[in-house]
Amino acid sequence: MNILTLPFYKYQGTGNDFVIIDGIINDVNSINNIVVAKLCDRKFGIGADGLMIISRLEGFDFEMIYYNSDGGLSTMCGNGGRCIAALAHQLGYCRLEVHFLAADGPHFASLESDEVALGMANVEVINKINPSDYVLNTGSPHYVSFTEKKNLENIVEVGKKIRYSENYISEGINVNLCFWDGSMLYVATLKEELRMKP
């Protein structure tokens, strides 16, 4: 099938947008890193933060195959997981309780009305960098920094300094700046390309 005529869906979850292809009824053999990068290009393609394929897998409702916008196979994406669970239910591949496999292992999700609750992998290790900064893995690596509220507005500037520092430049890391005001937690996130090792 010509990739230009391949049906797709466009979903967004908390601001992250995704192209999703039903690989159960469509031939996705032509999908590769070059095609993904072209489809996700915001000027010349559909435009998206990533591309996901719903694939059949015995023992699960489906398998989630996730690519970053540059075409690289990637780690788990929470917002992507919520979107693909909602679409899989819409397509009739699962009920309101969803069990699927992603790059980091099995996940459960539940749907109620237009909301999707997703269980992420247990965080086994939290590395404390200093009194206010932590590194942990939720299926993809995150650098979490508790800071002043005003710094949340500078997430791109502050986040890129962390993301492209010597420790994280080769593997990539999501950066979360957080502020707790005593009753509410505010979070700003810089999501960068996170590739799985070959």
Image (cartoon, helix red, strand yellow):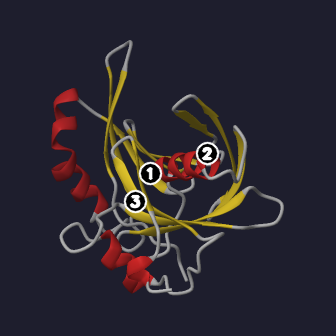
Q: Is residue 83 above or below residue 183?
A: below
Left or right of residue 53, residue 41 in this image = left
Which numbered disc, 3 or 2, marks the residue closer to the eye? 2
Asked if one can make out residue 110 in the rendered structure from this viewpoint, the answer is: yes
Residue at which label 2 appears = 120
Q: Earlier in the sequence, mark 1 or mark 3?
A: 1
**Residue type, numbered disc 1:** His
| SS type, badge 1 | strand
| SS type, badge 2 | loop
Can you give x and y, in whole percent of width and height, for residue 62 in the image? Answer: 70, 60
**From mark 3 to mark 2, how far is it between C-alphas?**
17 Å
Left or right of residue 132, residue 60 in this image = right
Q: Which of the 4 quarters of the picture holds residue 82?
A: top right
Seen from the viewer's position, the closer of residues 43 and 8 is 8
Q: Which of the 4 quarters of the picture holds residue 69?
A: bottom left
Dot 1 and dot 3 residues touching (CB under 8 Å): yes
Mark 2 surroundings within 10 Å by alpha-carbon count, few (fewer than 14), some (14 through 19), many (20 or more): some
**Residue type, numbered disc 3:** Ile
**From mark 1 to mark 3, how far is it between C-alphas?**
6 Å
Q: Is residue 74 above or below residue 84?
A: below
Which numbered disc, 1 or 2, marks the residue closer to the eye? 2
Furthest-right residue in view? 59
What mark, if any, has residue 173 been given in the picture?
Answer: 3
Residue at which label 1 appears = 142
Dot 1 and dot 2 residues touching (CB under 8 Å): no
**Residue type, numbered disc 2:** Met
Q: Is residue 85 above or below residue 43?
A: above
